[in-house]
Every structure is written in structure tokens, then in C-alpha cells.
Amino acid sequence: MATYPDLVRTYLHGRHLLRTADERRLLRAGVDVYGLDMTAAQRLLGEEATRAGVARQVDVDAATRALLAARPSRTGRAGRVSSAEFERIGQFYRARAGGQLPQAEVDGRIKRLMIEENVAPRAEGWLWRTRGWFDRIPEHQPMGGEPAGPGGGTGRGAAPDAVGADPGSVTLAVPARAILSAWAERANAVNVAGVVALYAPQGLLLATAAPEPRQGQASIRQYFQTLLAHPRFAVRMGPELASIGQDPVTVSGLYEFSWVDAQGQPVMVPSRYTFVLTRPPGPGGGAPDGAILQHHSSALPNRPGSGEV
């Protein structure tokens, strides 16, 4: 069975920055799914991030706050930041974040930090000295689950509710949770026709064990006829790691397949998934108001049975 460090390593793979919203989701999974206390989850996550060389947004923000606080005072105008200095702070932030964030997002994040730390911009200009250079920067809006600063609320950019999001938030146009629940229930019931009905007519399945893409329901059906034929086949949905969009919505996370092999031995294959979900183009549909456009599945590396899922 996949462990909490497995979950963290899978999520961090190929990333340069662990955003605050995603870190909170991972910590919640450590507590709710793996039974850890928050201190242990934070320690393990920090160790894996350090091992993977992935920067954490919370650390980048803290370093930038310290940089803003350490700026020298200037004749009664302490804390005022010029446009040139703002650019240098942006270079510092972007480098600490792994150099992968778009410059517009970096500028917006620094603007928000300045507002939270009560650091004012310097008025500039030839004829009229204004802070227009600063006011024109769009303020970074926190992504879903990310703190918006001392006020505590989320901004206009907060991601709507999806699989794994906090209860009480806005419901997605596409009911991601219902579609994935239906997929798991039908797979566990060895209902091949029911599983295939969840996919769009020209849906795409990129499966671990199939060397070629499975395009369309007929090809997808052949795959699941083989997969679900394993004795005592089951799939257990694990923590959802991220969800983006409303229609289509992309949902990524972990799940685990299990069955009994020809020698009667149990096989468990921890895996990762990405589903792209949309409303069906016409009447019908295999799940409430939704269909699977794309499904990408891969087993966690170096696991027994990873070539059979």
C-alpha cells in the first residue's frame, strides 16, 4: 500500500514549487487518509520537499517578507519601494521559487506581500509623481485553499469546489465527485459496460499496460474487459491532489488497484491518475451530467504488477 511519503513524492515529481494550497491538501491527506498527526505530516512533507529540491511557497513568501522588513530606512520614508527595487525583489522571489513562475504572477505575489506587510510603493514620474506603476500591477489572488493573508478569506481567484476541495465552497459545473465515484463503483462491481459508458464517445484512455492509446468506447471496452477479469479485482480511490477548471475540469490524484494472481497471491498496485471531465455533448451520459474526455493512469514506479494496470 502506498505510504504518505509515496503520496508526497508522487505529487512533487517534476515540480519546482509547492504552492501553499497544494501543501495544505497534502497535509490534510496525511492526517485524514494516513492517520498522521499534523506535526508528523509536516515533518515528512518537509523532508520530501527538501530531498526533491522543491521550494515551498510558504518559505519563499517568508524569505520575501524578511527581505522587505530588512530594507534600510531613508529619511522618514522607511519601507517605500521604488519600481527598480520592486523588480529586484521580483528576481529574488522568482529565483527562490525555482524560476518557473510567470513574471506576472511573481509581481502579483510581491504586491500582495507588500500590502500585507504595510510596505508602501514610492511615487515616481517626471511631471507628476504617482504610484501608478504599482497600482497597475494585478494583485495576486490566492488559488483554492490558499490563505489570502491576515484577513483569512479567499480571493476572487479561489478555485471552486471539486474532488478533494473544502466543503461549502462553490460547486463545479461538472460534478467531478459523482463521476469518479460512479467510475470506482462500477469497476468494483466488474461492470464493464457501466465503466465504458462513463467515457465520452471519443474519449481517450492512456493506460499503463496498453502500449497504444485507447481512443473511443470500443477500444476502451477491450481494455477494461481484460483488467476487470482479474480475480477479486478492486480499486480504492485515494486522496485527490488537485482540480482545475469548471468545464472541462481536470482532477488528479492517487488510487490503488488490487486482485489475486494465478498463484493465489494478492497483488496491489498503487497508481496515479488524471481525469479530464466534461458535460456530454448530447442526451444521456453514463454519470450525472458528465463524461470522461481523457483518463491518464500510471502505476507508481518500481511496484509489483505495474505492467498490468
Image (spheres, rainbow, N blue to C red):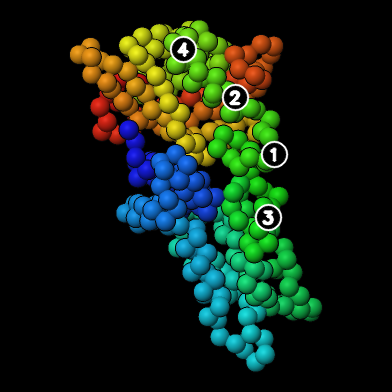
Amino acid carrying label 1: it is Val
Q: Residue at x 44, y 10 (%)?
A: 190
Q: Residue furthest bottom?
A: 75
Q: Residue at x 63, y 43 (%)?
A: 159
- Asked if the residue under mark 2 is in contact with the one under mark 3, i.e. CB atoms within 8 Å, the reply is no
Amino acid carrying label 2: it is Ala
Q: Nearer the viewer, mark 4 or mark 1?
A: 4
Measured as percent of width and height from the top left, residue 286 is found at 59, 14
Q: Distance between the residues labelled 1 and 2?
A: 15 Å
Q: Earlier in the sequence, mark 4 or mark 3?
A: 3
Q: In which quarter of the image is the C terminus?
A: top left
Question: Looking at the image, which is closer to me, 250 or 93?
Answer: 250
Question: Looking at the image, which is closer to me, 36 or 6?
Answer: 36
Q: Which residue lies furthest to the right in this view?
A: 128
Q: Distance between the residues labelled 4 and 3?
A: 42 Å
Q: Distance between the residues labelled 3 and 2?
A: 28 Å
Name the residue carrying label 3: 153
What SS does tag 4 mark?
loop
Q: Earlier in the sequence, mark 1 or mark 2?
A: 1
What SS does tag 3 mark?
loop
